[in-house]
Image (cartoon, rainbow, N blue to C red):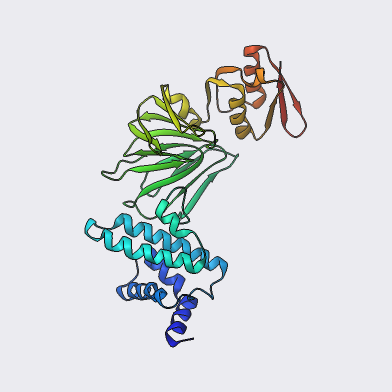
Amino acid sequence: MSIVREHYMEMNNNRLKELLHKYLEGSASEQEVREVDDWYRSFDTHAGLTDQLTASEKDTLEQLLLLRIRTAISEAAPARVVRMRTRHWVAAAVVAAVLGIGGYYAVQRMHPAPQAIALTETSNRSGIRRISLPDSSVVWLNFDSKVHFSQAGIHAAREVWLEGEGYFEVRPQDNNAFTVHAGKLDVQVLGTSFNVDAYSPARAVTVTVVNGKVAVGAGAGRTTLTANQQAVFTTATGGITTQAITAADCSAWTTGQLVFRKATFQDIAMRLERRYNTHIRFGSPEVANALLTASFEEREPLTGVLGKLCAIYGFKYKEEANATYVVYK
């Protein structure tokens, strides 16, 4: 092993994560930045520099590198973008090759969520969560939902990846759009309030605007929504349909309310299952597909909700073992 390679292998063992952490935060000195840059360039002739890293350390390295690449590109001045983009993308490609990972392609595509995502917030079945994002925007996560985002800084690219349902209040930033990725659908805004239901992204994603304006798109299809409009993206066809709606109904869950407008009993049951941590079955398709309109306060027990919903059509329900309920005619 050459002296040069030994030097960089030693740097990997003793200095690599410390330097990358500083480089990522932007707190590295000029000398430390040069050291990282020299390390990047060393890949040209020394492809085994990460051989002594553990799998966990390699994963950490990948995430730090890709997040730094993303931050550098988004924050670079226009005159520097081309130089930084080329330099860091090449570095990422080399790192991906050395580590045996697909990170380079994640940087190129950025959808679905790349390994560069720094933080994940989850709302389990114990309650609704309110989360402040790095740019001071706010998201409420409904039961059993998750949001991924970067902590790259207030002026960096503003992107989040949503699983489940989230209500967003986006802080305006001139010329810096806020993007939500939900399944195959992208929602882009500058500053507004809207709800995204992506509990079943393989089937459909629903976007409802409370105020402001959003652009909703998937592939070549794209539409614009304003207050009290809703778009439904059907995954199987790739089509987007829009309709007028009372947007407040779709965000009522953020205060604990349950509001259903011409929803099938089966769709309602899916929400009740998450809220009450239970399982609901139906005695027939007729019961499952019945359309219902109703609203309930936060503290309404499940038995009260089921009883009132069943009363609309004269249905019945019974409780079985393991917190399972059966609704039948």
Residue 297, placed above or below residue 179 = above
The residue closer to the viewer here, 152 or 58, is: 58
Residue at x-position 45% and y-position 73%? 16
Residue at x-position 65% and y-position 35%? 277
The residue closer to the viewer here, 152 or 207, is: 207
Residue at x-position 40% and y-position 33%? 194
Residue 298 lies left or right of residue 97; in this view the side is: right
The residue closer to the viewer here, 263 or 2, is: 2
Residue 82 lies left or right of residue 209; in this view the side is: left
Q: Where is the C terminus found, in terms of image quarters?
A: top right
Q: Where is residue 47 drawn, in percent x and y?
A: 46, 75
Mark yes or no: residue 25 visible.
no
Q: Where is residue 128 drawn, in percent x and y?
A: 53, 38
Residue closest to the far bottom: 3
Q: Quadrant of residue 151?
A: bottom left
Residue 86, placed above or below residue 221 = below
Residue 171 lies left or right of residue 80; in this view the side is: right
Residue closest to the far right: 321
Residue 291 lies left or right of residue 207; in this view the side is: right
How many tags in the picture? Answer: 0
Q: Where is residue 72 drawn, in percent x and y?
A: 33, 60
Residue closest to the far left: 79
Q: Where is residue 6 drawn, in percent x and y?
A: 47, 84
Mark yes or no: residue 269 visible.
yes
Residue 171, placed above or below residue 311 = below
